[in-house]
Image: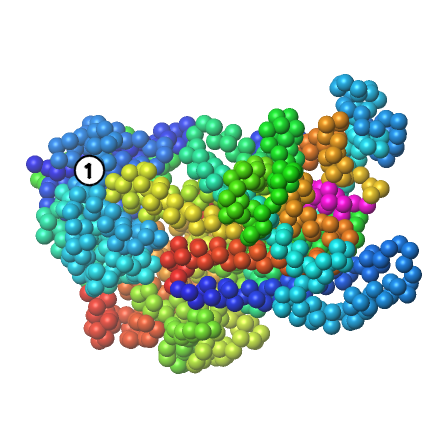
């Protein structure tokens, strides 16, 4: 007997005159007490399922289908009042952004109390304290009087998990619950969720973009692509013996921490957006699929059965032929030519009022060198100081201790000479492509900004822009577009292009692939590897993702709370971590 | 938690100092000679010069300022050139009247503003929203003195329903206890005076209030729209909390914060606007005092009344800041 | 391709109203028929021509000195629009410069500007303008000056907040890293981001300038007694509301129409300009 069953679920969106299916003929089933993972990249529609269950779709979206059954009742035909009665009681939600999911002007206690009273708990205070204790939060009684902004992201998420399980629901829907959290916190949160799930025998719909995480947490996995399920089976089977080409490609696109080094599989372009979906007949993955053939484009996708493992592809046997190439070879590093030399670097921020000064040491006593053409990864969680380090190198912050030498010159002072040296040697690629590109400038103008500042005439700039775009693998027409007309991956390419315009010797990249889909990330990493071949620049890559660093960088530096705890060659550090924090970081990465 | 508020209060002192400096400086640019204005037209040059000396206008400006500042801090606001009475006394008579009018107007503006804001919010994405939005824009095109005139025309002349001159019916004497007429009428136990005072307060307060309500409506609506897009509202819905509860206990508590801040700023404009309303309704408050003083270049009154307006505005904005601090736990960190 | 803002209903209505007022102001000598200060002491306080006792020669009646209300109305528009056209941009320039420098440079300059705005905002604008007029003396030129001195804070406060946000954006930092100097960054990267807001504020400020001029003239501290202004007409017409109501109603309606024109225009621009140029919306 299944707890949740979706039969031919459709969610259609009205975009202007078009009617586009965001979810098309979705079939799912979830048994009580089981954990089902819904895996997909952004735009695949995985959040739509949760919203359809709650009937909280954005305006213009409608849900229909043969049935969406929960505990025997059809949610699609249920009156709104009955459905609202289920929410919070039988069906609970855990959100993606814990810090903003709690009302900032009300105490934890007042919100928890409101919820408990609604579900009919008599002594809400005692129940709340017990619930907070069950997620291992210290001082539960005191926590009730606190406000959300006084808690960390991880603590807020635990509060939300406690609230979700407090009514002992039959189903909990967790929509990317750990995406906004650091990887060590993620591990703890997952642990807490599993404890409660097993304790109350709750069924969980775990929505995530991370296939390996899903494999670790869930009993079954359903992989979504462009609004439809492409594969559904037991977790280990989907992970280790995927039968759908997309699943295989997804697995091969993501860099791994463990196992032998390999290349990344790059899928071309990206998942079709809603508008584009209307125009694809047949299998929606066909345009990007390495196994695609004529028949895929004509017939709609079939769902084949293979024991408890369903695949929406008629050629599951051929998946084994999909392979990632060899790992990107690191070009010869000219040993001896030191590009960046940092000694004893420190930065202390003074905050607070004149009455109560606080000093925060963001970076303390950092020492490292970077050779010309070398790729160095800096890993750490939030608060580790890695972003401050990047800003110090770029001259956006002034060091309070130590010195930085770029190409032999001391740039720790903030004078004209230092600025000129930096301008010629180092450029930065920013994290958020949204705020890193001026929305009022055309792409061609952005990538040649450095030339404009140097006074190069417009005609020459235009030619150079076309050259850079080609280098980035982007069609020249994109040069006349504005940033908001590009996708996230394209914007990030423009970001990189701008920094490479004057061919700097050093590129500082701050979290440039976080927040991107796995397949887009793979494209960018491949781009960086290729650009490295051509231009031979050194890269300081800041990232919280160890797998990315392992793929791209031959050396790594681990930072914790402003201090470098370990550094060395990447394969050595990851294979034999010495510092306990490094070990903790490696442990926390989902293996699947 | 008190620290940010204490800092705000501490900043008030220097602001007032600078304000008084600016006031003083601006008035010393006068093309008119207050000494000459205080003497009859037949006065001789010697007499005018003597008057100048008596008023202290022959001393250097900085000295004049220091003297004036010292006197003011001791409560001595000088003597009116024109009316030959201590300014302090004039202030005591008129300030409560202006405050009474402004408070009544603020109440009107607050009720209209919040009610209207909620109504605008309820109408969003529905038919009638465009009309409501247009109405607020048109209402904002009528400044307070025009509302005042319109109300006189409508309710005073055409309909003859309400009085539009002074604070009381002619013939009634004003009980003097606190200066706040409504309060005084109750204190001396004269309900008829109370009723008359209320009727006289109605039109000016309504005109002043309705002029400053539309921005409040707009800000409340916009704040509510912003708040409703926040994650915590969606999460509350996912917990099954009903819409009414969400509006009153979740959204409003957040949306009221920028609205209150705006109301504090609006009070500054409203308080200044009360001057015009007083002139139009012949309401004996600071506004009329100021206008007469300005026409006669009566410096002591202009300085003292100008400073008083600023003190009241600063007091109100500080109070509003304190309130927002109280209601917004994030600011108390 | 007509840009989006030009298709907004509010914008169009506002422009039509303002065009009307402008036309009236420019063509005043043609339309009025007589000079606004021509006194006819035999025909004082005439009501409108369609009312009982009215005279066809004076369409809206005459005031206490026998001057034609309609003519005065038209010439008053000149003063109103002149003040709006000069004072508002003046306040805008002062306020915007202060906001740009304060928001971009930060530090002590930002603190100074912030404190200056605080001091200014503790004065009710009406009071401050009155006091300034006392200090400066009456006349249109001084009215314009007073408005600029009072209202620069309106621009500065709002724009400074916006500049603070924009200046912290990565693309501004990137422009610096790529070699642009501060001035070019301000002009090329920061300023264009605040232009929509600026235009909206400017339009609304013009409406405010018309109101302030009317208030000052009403109190007797505005234009010189020999000039015509709507506020003055209101002051005169207040006492004669029973005999010649249009002495009061005409300038009231005129002010309303002009201010409504600016407000509708500003409102419409705010809605249509903002959305298109808002960061990151596709």
| Residue at the image position 75 percent from the left and 58 percent from the top | B84
| Residue at the image position 41 percent from the left and 69 percent from the top | A388
Magenta range is C206-224
**Can you tell which quarter of the image residue A512 is in?**
bottom left
The spot of residue A433 in percent (x, y) is: 43, 54
What main secondary structure does the magenta stretch of the protein show? helix
Asked whether residue B145 is drawn in magenta, I would say no
Q: How is the image coloured?
A: rainbow
The spot of residue C126 in percent (x, y) is: 66, 49
Give the letter of the chain under mark 1. A
* Structural crowding at the residue carrying mark 1, measured as other residues with C-alpha within 10 Å and reported as few (<14), some (14–19) or many (≥20): some
Q: Secondary structure at mark 1?
A: helix
| Residue at the image position 36 percent from the left and 70 percent from the top | A385
Q: Quadrant of the N terminus of chain A?
A: top left
A563 to the left or right of A455: left
Q: Quadrant of the C terminus of chain A?
A: bottom left
Where is mark 1, residue-wise? A86
**Residue B181 seen anywhere in this rendered image of the structure:** yes
Above or below, B272 against C248 in this view is below
Residue nearest the observer in this picture, B92 or B250: B92
C111 to the left or right of A115: right
**Can you tell which quarter of the image residue A130 is in?**
bottom left
**Residue A318 seen anywhere in this rendered image of the structure:** no
Asked whether residue C215 is drawn in magenta, I would say yes
């Amino acid at each position: 007997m299944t707890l949740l069953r979706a039969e031919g679920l459709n969610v259609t969106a009205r975009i202007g005159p078009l009617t586009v299916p965001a979810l098309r003929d979705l079939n799912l089933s979830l048994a009580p007490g089981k954990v089902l993972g819904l895996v997909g990249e952004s735009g695949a529609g995985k959040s739509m399922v949760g919203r359809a269950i709650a009937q909280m779709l954005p305006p213009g979206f409608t849900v229909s289908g043969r049935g969406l059954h929960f505990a025997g009742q059809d949610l699609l035909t249920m009156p709104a009042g009955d459905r609202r009665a289920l929410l919070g009681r039988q069906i609970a939600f855990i959100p993606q952004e814990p810090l903003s999911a709690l009302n900032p002007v009300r105490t934890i206690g007042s919100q928890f109390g409101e919820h408990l009273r609604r579900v009919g708990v008599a002594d809400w205070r005692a129940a709340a304290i017990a619930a907070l204790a069950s997620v291992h939060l210290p001082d539960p009684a005191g926590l009730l009087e606190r406000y959300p902004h006084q808690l960390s992201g991880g603590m807020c998420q635990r509060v939300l998990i406690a609230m979700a399980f407090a009514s002992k629901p039959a189903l909990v829907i967790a929509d990317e619950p750990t995406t906004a959290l650091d990887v060590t916190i993620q591990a703890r949160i997952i642990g807490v969720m599993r404890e409660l799930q097993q304790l109350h025998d709750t069924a969980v719909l775990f929505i995530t973009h991370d296939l390996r995480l899903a494999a670790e947490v869930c009993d079954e996995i359903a992989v979504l692509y462009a609004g439809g399920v492409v594969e559904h089976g037991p977790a280990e089977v989907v992970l280790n013996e995927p039968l759908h080409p997309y699943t295989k490609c997804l697995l091969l696109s993501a860099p791994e921490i463990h196992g032998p080094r390999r290349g990344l599989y790059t899928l071309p372009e990206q998942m079709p957006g809603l508008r584009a979906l209307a125009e694809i007949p047949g299998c929606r993955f066909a345009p990007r699929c390495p196994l695609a053939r004529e028949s895929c484009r004509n017939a709609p996708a079939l769902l084949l059965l293979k024991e408890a493992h369903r695949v929406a592809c008629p050629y599951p046997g051929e998946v084994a032929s999909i392979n990632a190439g060899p790992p990107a070879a690191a070009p010869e590093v000219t040993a001896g030519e030191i590009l960046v030399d940092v000694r004893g670097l420190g930065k202390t921020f003074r905050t607070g009022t004149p009455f109560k000064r606080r000093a925060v040491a963001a970076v303390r006593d950092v020492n490292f060198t970077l050779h010309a053409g070398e790729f160095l990864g800096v890993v750490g969680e939030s608060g580790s100081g890695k972003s401050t380090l990047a800003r110090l190198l770029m001259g956006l912050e002034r060091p309070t201790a130590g010195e930085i030498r770029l190409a032999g010159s001391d740039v720790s002072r903030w004078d004209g000479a230092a600025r000129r040296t930096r301008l010629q040697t180092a450029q930065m690629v920013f994290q958020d492509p949204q705020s890193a590109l001026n929305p009022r400038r055309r792409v061609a103008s952005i990538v040649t900004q450095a030339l404009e500042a140097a006074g190069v005439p417009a005609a020459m700039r235009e030619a150079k822009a076309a050259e850079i775009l080609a280098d980035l693998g982007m069609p020249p027409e994109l040069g006349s577009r504005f940033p908001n007309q590009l996708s996230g991956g394209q914007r990030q390419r423009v970001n990189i292009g701008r920094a490479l315009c004057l061919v700097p010797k050093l590129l500082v990249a701050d979290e440039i692939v976080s927040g991107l889909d796995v397949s887009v990330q793979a494209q960018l990493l491949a781009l960086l590897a290729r650009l490295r071949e051509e231009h031979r620049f050194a890269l300081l890559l800041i990232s919280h993702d160890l797998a990315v660093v392992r793929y791209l960088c031959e050396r790594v530096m681990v930072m914790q709370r402003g201090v470098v705890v370990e550094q060395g060659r990447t394969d050595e550090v990851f294979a034999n971590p010495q510092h306990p924090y490094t070990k903790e970081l490696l442990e926390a990465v989902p293996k699947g | 938690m008190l620290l940010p508020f204490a800092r705000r209060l501490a900043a008030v002192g220097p602001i007032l100092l600078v304000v008084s400096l600016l006031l003083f400086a601006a008035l010393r640019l006068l093309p008119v000679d207050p000494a000459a204005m205080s003497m009859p037209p037949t006065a001789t040059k010697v007499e005018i010069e003597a008057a100048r000396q008596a008023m202290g206008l022959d001393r250097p400006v900085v000295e004049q300022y220091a003297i004036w500042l010292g006197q003011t801090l001791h409560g001595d606001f000088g003597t009116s050139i024109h009316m030959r009475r201590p300014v302090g006394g004039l202030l005591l008579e008129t300030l409560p009247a202006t405050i009474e009018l402004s408070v009544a107007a603020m109440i009107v503006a607050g009720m209209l503003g919040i009610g209207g804001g909620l109504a605008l919010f309820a109408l969003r994405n529905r038919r009638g929203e465009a009309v409501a939005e247009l109405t607020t824009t048109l209402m904002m095109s009528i400044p307070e003195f025009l509302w005042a005139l319109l109300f006189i025309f409508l309710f005073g002349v055409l309909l003859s329903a309400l009085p539009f001159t002074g604070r009381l019916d002619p013939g009634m004497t004003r009980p003097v206890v606190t200066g706040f007429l409504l309060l005084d009428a109750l204190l001396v136990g004269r309900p008829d005076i109370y009723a008359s005072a209320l009727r006289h307060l109605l039109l000016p307060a309504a005109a002043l209030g309705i002029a400053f309500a539309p921005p409040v409506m707009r800000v409340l609506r916009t704040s509510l729209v912003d708040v409703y897009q926040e994650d915590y509202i969606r999460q509350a819905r996912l917990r099954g909390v009903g819409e009414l509860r969400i509006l009153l206990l979740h959204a409003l508590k957040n949306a009221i914060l920028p609205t209150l801040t705006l109301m504090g700023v609006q009070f500054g404009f409203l308080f200044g606007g009360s001057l015009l309303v007083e002139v139009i309704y012949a309401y004996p408050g600071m506004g009329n005092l100021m206008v007469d003083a300005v026409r006669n270049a009566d410096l002591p009154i202009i300085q003292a009344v100008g400073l008083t307006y600023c003190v009241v505005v600063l007091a109100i904005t500080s109070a509003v800041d304190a309130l927002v601090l109280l209601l917004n736990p994030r600011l108390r960190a | 391709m007509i840009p989006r803002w030009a298709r907004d209903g509010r914008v169009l209505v506002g422009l039509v109203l303002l065009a009307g007022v402008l036309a009236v102001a420019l063509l005043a000598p043609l339309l009025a028929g007589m000079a606004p200060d021509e006194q006819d002491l035999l025909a004082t306080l005439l009501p409108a021509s369609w009312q009982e006792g009215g005279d066809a020669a004076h369409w809206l009646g005459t005031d206490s000195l026998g001057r034609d209300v309609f003519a005065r109305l038209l010439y008053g528009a000149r003063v109103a629009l002149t003040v709006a056209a000069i004072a508002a941009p003046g306040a805008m320039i002062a306020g915007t410069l202060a906001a740009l420098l304060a928001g971009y440079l930060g530090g002590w300059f930002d603190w100074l500007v912030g404190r200056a705005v605080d001091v200014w905002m503790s004065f009710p604008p009406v009071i401050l303008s009155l006091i300034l007029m006392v200090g400066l003396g009456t006349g249109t030129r001084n009215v314009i000056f007073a408005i600029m001195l009072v209202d620069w804070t309106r621009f500065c406060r709002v724009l400074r907040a916006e500049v603070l946000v924009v200046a912290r954006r990565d693309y501004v930092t990137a422009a610096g890293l790529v070699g642009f100097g501060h001035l070019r960054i301000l002009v090329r990267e920061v300023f264009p981001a605040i232009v929509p807001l600026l235009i909206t504020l400017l339009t609304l400020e013009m409406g405010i300038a018309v109101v302030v001029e009317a208030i000052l003239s009403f109190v007797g501290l505005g234009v010189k007694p020999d000039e015509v202004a709507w506020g003055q007409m209101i002051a005169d017409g207040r006492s004669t509301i029973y005999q010649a109501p249009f002495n009061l109603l005409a300038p009231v309606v005129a002010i309303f129409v002009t201010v409504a024109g600016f407000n509708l225009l500003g409102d419409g621009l705010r809605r249509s300009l903002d959305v298109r140029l808002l960061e990151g919306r596709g």
